[in-house]
Image (cartoon, helix red, strand yellow):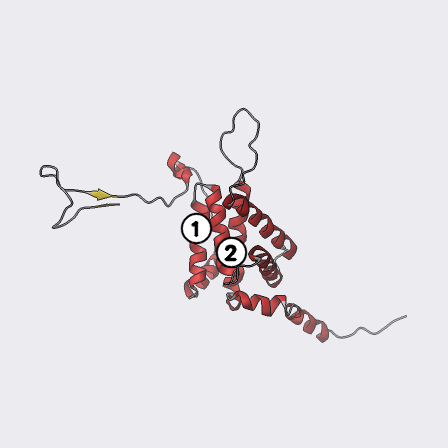
Amino acid sequence: MLWVPRGWALSYYCDLTSVYGTTLRRYPSEYDNYGWVYKGATVETEHLPEMRRLYRAVASNPSEGMRLALSRLNACLTRSDAADAILDGTIGLELLLGDEQNQSLSYKLRLRAAALALLHADPAYPATEVASKVKRLYAARSSIVHGLRKKRSKKASEPEDTRNANDRLLASDLLRFVLNVLLTNPAYLDPAKIDEGILLKGDEIDKPLKAKARRQPKRPHTS
């Protein structure tokens, strides 16, 4: 970004106009090496209705926490440093699932993320696995913020530092999942509603199934 002062200047050199500038990086590091010439990710036709639904849900959602969490997801996906990306992902989760009381934060986030998995009922995201992934992600976060690093490989050379690569993917995947569930069920944007409506009243999720079972006609008993 460059700008030229009009009617003022900090200094001049001869009669040359002072020009000021700064840079702001907001793109993946692979674009530094002609990354744009390679084929990137594509969106299949069958995914367009889901994209439309999510876009409309984001555009109509007034939550500031949702806006900030989306911003953290974008940063998580574009940062060059994987450790920074992991921190972005966990901050996004805390914006959506955390509260003002920071005691046992990772434990509360595990429970609430698992509760959303129960609500969403996606076979790809079973509740126990979601809870386990959040626990693993926060273990990685703790290692980063407390300066604990895994031992480096004893190989003679390593092309790049990939120690946090898997945890970075885990962070973005979990944040995407939670954003999707909350955009689909905005009533649970307040974490207290997750506690009260799902964790403390888990039978509410099964009500439609139980009601359907009650409507089924009983088969006659045969011996």
Is 38 positioned to the left or the right of 132 in the image?
left
Q: Secondary structure at mark 1?
A: helix
Residue named by callout 1: 74
Quarter that holds the C terminus: bottom right
Query: Residue drawn 46% across and 47% down?
Result: 77
Is 34 positioned to the left or the right of 223 in the image?
left
Q: Marks 2 and 1: which is nearer the front?
A: 2
Quarter that holds the N terminus: top left
Of pointers 2 and 1, the one earlier in the residue sequence: 1
Between marks 2 and 1, how big is the CA–CA gap?
13 Å
The answer to which of 63 and 90 lies nearer the viewer is 90
Q: Secondary structure at mark 2?
A: helix
Residue type pointed to by label 1: Asn
CB contact under 8 Å: marks 2 and 1:
no
206 to 13, vertically: above or below: below
In the rendered image, the residue lying farthest to the left is 15
Residue named by callout 2: 93
Picture quadrant where residue 27 is located: top left
Query: Residue drawn 63% across and 52% down?
Result: 129
Q: Residues within 10 Å of mark 1 (few under 14, many from 20)?
A: some
Q: Is residue 46 visible?
A: no
The answer to which of 29 and 89 lies nearer the viewer is 89
Is 159 positioned to the left or the right of 218 in the image?
left
